[in-house]
Amino acid sequence: MILRQFYIDGPGCLSYLVGCEHHGLAMVVDPDRHVDKYLELAEKLDLEIIGVVDTHLHTDHVSGNTELADVTGAEIFLPEAAEATLEHSTLAAGDVLEIGNVRLTVLPTPGHTPESISLVVWDVTRGEEPFAVLTGDTLRVGDVGRPDASHPAELEGLARQLYHSVFHTLAELPDSTIVYPGHATGGSCGKGGGSIRLSTIGYEKRTSPIFSLRDEAAFVEFVTTQLPERPANHDRLRELNRRGAPIVGVVEPEPLPLQDAVHYLARGAALVDTRPKAAFKEKHPHGAVHLELGPTISKRAGYVFYPEETIVLLLDSPEDYETAFWELARVGYDNIVGYLEGGMRTWEAAGFPVAAGDVEDVSPKTAYEIVQNGSHAQFIDVRERWEYRQAHPPGITLIPLGELPSRLNELDPDRPVVIICNSGNRSQTAAGILGQNGFRKVYNVLDGIVGWMQQGLPVEQGDSLQRGNP
């Protein structure tokens, strides 16, 4: 038997190739949209990919099922309850997928989403006990999938389903069964867990805080409170996976002469500057959105762009094009028409407007002085409400990051804006949103509320939410 795990840094997604070397067959479970890694491994091991399985309709990334099926001719399998409209075969309780000497048995494990399933892995040459279980986003190492990923209005009902999936389905597997989850650190589909990417049923039962919550009411309360922010593009990605994502195929760098890039920008395309932060701060095209190329770009993109938005890239190097393309396509932004040929040099040579330092990193102490010195700065907290309640600077306005694009009318673009979050990451994304929408001066508070409190600056607690024009 072959069971290989693949990890995507940033979103924390895990996917798997399960195969039988004796028969030369394999299936891919919960595939990423950039499918070359599965194809390369299958070729190396002389395996034919005959099936692609998704344990649920993902809400944080686009499945690579249509991409893999297009290249390999593999059959797509999805849970029956997903009611997907792409061409596929359905999976229900007890169904078995045969991969030579390897079998995958379907266990319904709803809760993260209503249709979620787990796949019990059997090697028929080794005995009558299961070898492993692919749990999707139902059970993670030390955590479970969030129950509001797909249907936030049904939070409590899904949390109760999740309880029964964990305690009355997965916990009944032999303790020796290896747990291969669909997420590790970095994802938005849970609220805890760590960097470890596999466990066993027995170890989770003995050590996971989840399994200490045997009382259903205590479990429901735990998994429905203090959830991390729910990205604004969750619903869009789920629907895209229900329909099946368009085929991307081979990605070739697409240099755009300046006149072509301007053609797209004049018609509303977004100019995305993926260069390092220092280069962006030194100078960048006026109105460009800064999403530094790296593990977090795919998570941040969903807060900045509208569905189907046309994107022009500004790259540090043309060699970055394919990486940038797949990072954005992973979260459904594949309408990328190319990159500006010649980059910043070409833009400046044409005399187009350049900005510098309009998003400025400041220490918590400097931010406090800006707010207090009569500058009429607007002070914004982009964390979640539960984080705000624990501690926040006095007089600050709460606008969670996921709500910011729809609440820009509450802010004055001609006045400075000071933005704080927990550690300085979400506030950087928020700064990009404001920059794209013409705000003249934006301050990003380094180290966030953590640094604010470490420097002994004043905080308040509770629910006294500030709204309106701060």
Image (tube, helix red, strand yellow):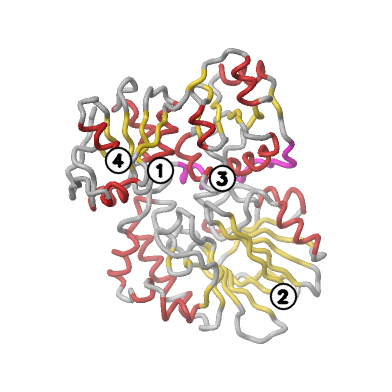
Which of pointers 3 and 1 lies earlier in the amino acid sequence? 3
Q: State the image coordinates of residue 27 (x, y, percent, origin top left).
A: 70, 63
Mark nearest the camera among 3 and 2 is 3
- Mark drawn on residue 294: 3
Is residue 433 rendered to the left or right of residue 179? left
Residue 335 screen position, x and y as percent: 61, 33
Q: Give the residue type that dot 1 points to.
A: Arg
Q: Amino acid at mark 4?
A: Asp
Say which quadrant the C terminus sits in: top left
Real-space CA distance between mark 1 and mark 4, rounded to the nearest whole angstrom? 10 Å
Mark earlier in primary sequence (1, 2): 2
Instruction: Report which residue position mark 1 lands on.
Output: 426
Left or right of residue 85, residue 419 in this image? left
State the separation of the CA atoms marked 4 and 2: 50 Å
Label 3 or label 4, whichever comes before in sequence order: 3
- Dot 1, crowdedness within 10 Å: few (<14), some or many (≥20)? many
Q: Nearer the viewer, residue 441 or 278?
A: 278
Disc 1 + disc 2, Cβ < 8 Å:
no
What element does badge 3 sit on? Answer: loop
Question: Which of 235 and 188 lies nearest the eye of the viewer?
Answer: 188
Name which residue lies at 42% across and 39% down. Answer: 428
Disc sitting over residue 381 in the figure: 4
Q: Which residue is mark 2?
A: 1
Question: Which range of residues does the magenta coloring cover?
Answer: 233-252
